[in-house]
Amino acid sequence: MVAFMKNYITGNDWLDFVNSLLPASSMIRNTSALLVTEMDVVRKVVDELRKNYDLGVTYMLVHIAVEIGRFYHIPHSRVTTACLQLADEILPPVWSRVLNNLTIPLTADPSRADQIFHKVHEVFSKHALKFGMSEDDKDLSSFLIANVSLRTHNSTMNTLQNHSVWRPSEISGSSASFPTMHAVLKRREALRRLTQPPSAEEAILGRYLLTNDVTYSRLLNTVMLPAALRRRPVLYTNQVPLELDMGVVGVLLAIQVFRAGEPAESSFDEWYHTNVGFFSHCMAGSKIQNVAASFESLPTSRVLTLFRLTYSLLIVHRVVREEYEEYRGASNFDKVWQSAQQTLYRRYCLLTCGGSWSSDSEKSRLDCFVPIANSPAFFEAFECPSLKFGLGKSCLDLA
């Protein structure tokens, strides 16, 4: 292969190949400057290959092509995220502003997320699941649930001190080409992080800033809602009915508040057996098609996930019910309440079965069916007998 490349493929051929992978504005020329990491390793290889320039150029261009191909292999939907992650290595202050500029125009008012979290937290505090916990764990669970907070900030980076911020004048004596600029900035940021390491809060929040899922940090006792989930059609504004957002963001937030209230390892087994174990045994005896068989083979971690999901759906339904309670005296209340419940469950089904939650059809089916099967209000809202669905009774109720 090497002999063939040496005899029939010249450096110019490889250069043309590399350029075919690049946009017109980024073409590589014979005099182009390329950013090189691990220079010592590269120099050793070059020293060996410099005896045969054609082979050396071919070798280098193969690696350049591989690197370019690896970057362009990133799906288009992930390019922005990948670029932001790379930018974080060199320009955290500017990176924060860029992220804000990309997300703020598209995201809902943070107060909407705060409103949903507050309502979920308020209801969950009344129905925290503490059966099977030791007294110490009950106290800890109560403390964590009472003090859990929500973070919706677009950026976790604080404004850096003036001497830590890059100034264009630092490379004014150079050609100011991108590789030079990148190398200067990366070196400065590496040195800054050695002298000013990020706090635990910055490190944890920064890790989840670009994710597309709600997460919980027990160390910070904080639920993090990233910008990706604070935009339509996931989260709307105060101008739309609450159930529209509760069926998606409300459920995701409730899951993480549930995690905040879970016991420590010392009493986890007893708590699991008392609550999740009973739930699993009950579902294994259901007549829902394929669900019973699935539960018999599910690992405990997966059963716990379904348990959290089911309990969270019950929580958000209670939130919406309390929201509509003040209108119970209205003449058209029954019709309006039925429509609200239908919207809540449709949104939930879009979350779990609509493709955004999981690409695994079996997982999505259980994520959708199991919580719905344990929601009597679902059958009431859509006027379908629960017995026909295969479940005569719920396997889980609010505490």
Image: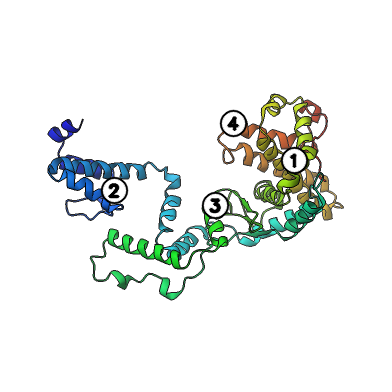
User: Amino acid under label 4?
Assistant: Ser
Q: CA distance from mark 2 to mark 3?
A: 28 Å
* Quarter residue 310 falls in: top right
User: Amino acid under label 2?
Assistant: Pro
Percent of width and height locating residue 199: 54, 64
The numbered disc on residue 228 is 3
- Judged from the image, the secondary structure of the residue bearing numbered disc 1 is helix
Residue where numbered disc 2 is placed: 23
Q: CA distance from mark 4 to mark 2?
A: 38 Å
Chain-order first, disc 1 or disc 2 = 2
- Asked if the residues shown at circle 2 and circle 3 are in contact, with their CB atoms under 8 angstroms apart, the answer is no
Percent of width and height locating residue 111: 65, 62
Q: Is residue 168 left or right of residue 248?
A: left
Query: How many labels, in total?
Result: 4
The residue positioned 28% from the left and 58% from the top of the image is 179
Residue 391, placed above or below residue 191: above
Question: Which callout, 1 or 2, points to the residue nearer the camera?
Answer: 1
Q: Is residue 381 visible?
A: no
Chain-order first, disc 3 or disc 1 = 3
Residue where numbered disc 4 is placed: 361
The numbered disc on residue 269 is 1
